[in-house]
Every structure is written in C-alpha cells, then in structure tokens.
Image (cartoon, rainbow, N blue to C red):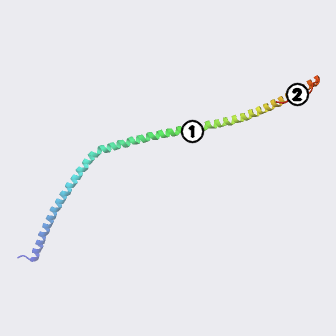
Amino acid sequence: MEDPLNLTIQVIQALAVLVLGVGMIMLARALRRIKRSLDKVDNALDSIGRDARPVLDRARAVGENLNFIVMSVRKEVEHASETISRANERLEAALDVADDRVQELGALIQVVQGEVEDTLLTATSTLRGIRTGAKLLRRRGRNDDEEPEVEDREE
C-alpha cells in the first residue's frame, strides 16, 4: 500500500488538474462569448460607419458651403463698410463746403443789408431835402405873388 501522504498529494493533484481543466473550459467559453460580442460590436460599427459615411460627407459639404457663405458675407460687409466710410467722408466734406458757403452768404447778406439801409437813409434824407426845398420855393413864390400864406401839410 501506498503511503497516505502520497495518496493525498495525488488526489489533490488530480483535483487541481480537474479544477484547472474546468476553469480552462469555463475560460474558453467566456472568451468565445466575448469574441462573439466583439464580432457583433465590430459588425455594428462597420454598419454604422457605412451608414454614417454619407451623412459625414454631407455634413462636411455643408460645412464647406457655410464657410464659403460666411466668407462671402464677410467680404460684402467689408465692402459695404468701406463704401459707407467713403460716403460719410464725402458727406462731411460737402457739409463743410455748404457751411462755408452759408457763412459767406450770411456775410454777403449783411453787406447788402448795410448797403440797402445806407441807400434808404440817403434816399430818405434826399427826399426830405427835396421836400424842404420845394416848400421853401413855394413860400418864396407866394411871397413874390403876395398871396396869403397857407401851410402845406406833409403827407
């Protein structure tokens, strides 16, 4: 008979081999399931990739079109801004010229007004002088004719 210690070691070895074998079988089954799951995920990703490619291509094209539109709008806005700036400068220059002309016209009107006032004063004083002279001449003529004096009323 064999030694009980050897027998125990052999039984433990057999059990260890059996546990390792069962563990290997379970590990193989788990690995097979994981592989199937990974294959399914890979197939799903391939399918999504095939389905998503046209969407991504269209999205890329839309992005490029939007970029082109933004650049075009930016150019137009810059052009409009430059045009407005130039028009503003011209308007300011025209307003300056108009202001100068209005000031010159105001000065001219003051000169003309002064001349008109002087002319009216001269004409008025001339008319008074003529009227006074005419009165004196009438008085003298009456004195010569010996007519009674009648005072003329001024109108």
Is the residue 111 above or below the residue 3 in the image?
A: above
Is the residue 96 above or below the residue 23 in the image?
A: above
Q: In the rendering, at what x and y percent does residue 110 appear?
A: 73, 35
Q: Earlier in the sequence, mark 2 or mark 1?
A: 1
Query: Which mark is on residue 146?
Result: none
Q: In the rendering, at what x and y percent does residue 76 appear?
A: 47, 38
Mark 1 crowdedness (10 Å alpha carbons): few <14, some 14-19, many ≥20: few
Residue that label 2 marks: 135
Tell me the SS state at disc 2. Answer: helix
Left or right? Give the position of 99 relative to 145.
Answer: left
Residue 93, picture quadrant: top right
Residue 132, picture quadrant: top right
Q: Nearer the viewer, residue 59 or 125?
A: 125
Mark 2 crowdedness (10 Å alpha carbons): few <14, some 14-19, many ≥20: some
Q: Nearer the viewer, residue 96 or 123?
A: 123
Please state which of the two labelled residues, at mark 2 or mark 1, is closer to the viewer: 2
Q: Residue at x 83, y 29 (%)?
A: 127
So how many labels did they put on this image?
Answer: 2
Q: Nearer the viewer, residue 58 or 107?
A: 107
Q: Residue at x 32, y 43 (%)?
A: 57
Left or right? Give the position of 76 relative to 137.
Answer: left
Residue that label 1 marks: 88
Q: Residue pushed farthest left? A: 1
- Report the amino acid beneath label 2: Lys
Q: Nearer the viewer, residue 44 or 95?
A: 95
Q: In the rendering, at what x and y percent does residue 118 appear?
A: 79, 32
Left or right? Give the position of 106 relative to 60.
Answer: right
- Report the amino acid beneath label 1: Asn
Q: Residue pushed farthest top? A: 145
Q: Quadrant of the C terminus?
A: top right
Left or right? Give the position of 103 relative to 18.
Answer: right
Q: Quadrant of the N terminus?
A: bottom left
